[in-house]
Amino acid sequence: MRIAIITAVITLLSMAAVLSASARAGGGAGTDSAGAAAGEDDSVGTWTITRAQAGLVQLTIGWSTHNWGRLTPLADIRGLDEAVFQAGTPLPVRLQLEREAGTFHLEGTFRDGQGAGQFRFEPNRAFVAALAAAGVQGAGAASEQDLMSLALAGTTAASVRELAALELGTLATADVVSFAIHKVTPEYVRAMRSLGVEDTRTPAALVEMRIHGVTPEIVTELQALGYRLDRAQLVQMRIHGVTPALARELRGPGGEALPAADLVAMRVQGVSPEYAREMRAAGLGDLSAAALVELRSQGVSPEYIRELASLGYTRLSRDELLQLRIQGVSAAGIRELRALGLRDLTTRQLLDLRIHGVTPAFIRQMRAAGFTTASPEELVRMRLNGVGAPRARR
């Protein structure tokens, strides 16, 4: 039941995460954002370039409140060569990054291997005709911002034709732009389908997987562990941080692979492989995923079990541990009761004292009123009958 409740909550959280991610896709955020508010001039902005690795540079484009950054082949940026990177004093540069959807004109300076300046984007309206020819709905209404997003991603007419041929339904301009922003390529679509991932025939499904980092590599690793998951399950696992490495370590009591829903519930509640091992080693037997989730959600930790054991409470059952923890019975509280003369209490007596509000302060009141030898049961009856210090004295 607890797993089912947690799964329902997880589903709601996942829906919220998807809506949030979709909003980010529309508005743009992070190093690959390409959205903007209406009315802003997104054809101009700033740029920086730094050396990355052999043949590649890190190009970052900023405009409005957004940034886009990606490794870019050095050869793609006209006017940029090794001599520019070697400049020891400010070197004025005029560079061009030409894409099918348009050209970025970069002006600025380089010094000590780093460049920065202003850019202006020149859209290629002829690319709109190429989109229309590929069957993209609403291509004629593509905005300058749309073309800039496509240019930033290096989208080509050939790649759009490939996507259109992959039975994704009628692609709209917004779909093509979203694909570009989130790196949904023909290769990605084909790879996911070849792995048997269901529901890969709509743009929204593919973008959702890409947003949450569902890659062919991750799917391959999970399948090697015996998991055959649909899109929704893969997205949930990614949202909640269930990695192939975690799935490999977090196994059932017999070493078997756990259902994906159990892995997600365990991850949400913080059940780590270490926690599972320690709890099983604590003498609680072959704990199921549901049992581990319940123990963890109620705060029953290996440390809690060890603290109780140090006071003589060993070999407690799972239900006893849960009840003690839920009712707030702690090692410190037990020691305080012992200091007041209540020794060798059973777990039932500890629970009754807590449930009925027999606190150390109440016990001290009763002791001061003359009830120096009152048993746990008598103290509970006094509490239930509303006996306080003044009344006790009478």
Image (cartoon, rainbow, N blue to C red):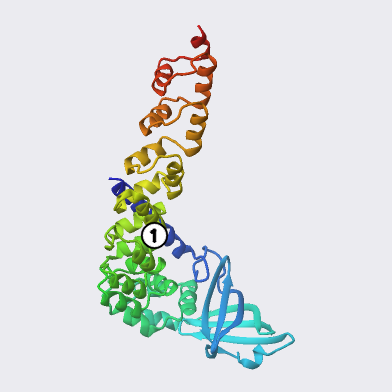
78 above or below 350?
A: below
Q: Position of residue 38 (x, y in %)?
A: 51, 63
Looking at the image, which residue is at 52% across and 83% down?
72
Neighbour tally class for label 1: few under 14, some 14-19, many 20 plus, Cα within 10 Å: some
Relative depth, front residue between 301 and 126: 301
Image quarter of the N terminus: top left
Q: Position of residue 99 (x, y in %)?
A: 48, 84
Q: Is residue 134 visible to us here? A: no
Relative depth, front residue between 219 and 90: 219
Q: Residue furthest top?
A: 394
276 above or below 357?
A: below
Query: Could you say which quadrant of the image residue 350 lies in?
Result: top left
Q: Is residue 32 left or right of residue 185?
A: right
Q: Is residue 382 visible to us here? A: yes
Relative depth, front residue between 359 and 159: 359
Q: Is residue 45 left or right of residue 338?
A: right
Looking at the image, which residue is at 36% across and 37% down?
323
Q: Position of residue 356 (x, y in %)?
A: 41, 25
**What secondary structure is found at the residue carrying circle 1?**
helix
Q: Position of residue 73 (x, y in %)?
A: 52, 87
The amino acid type found where label 1 is placed reads Pro
Looking at the image, which residue is at 34% across and 80% down?
187
Q: Residue furthest right?
A: 89
Q: Which residue is mark 1?
A: 273
Q: Is residue 363 left or right of residue 22?
A: right
Relative depth, front residue between 2 and 59: 2
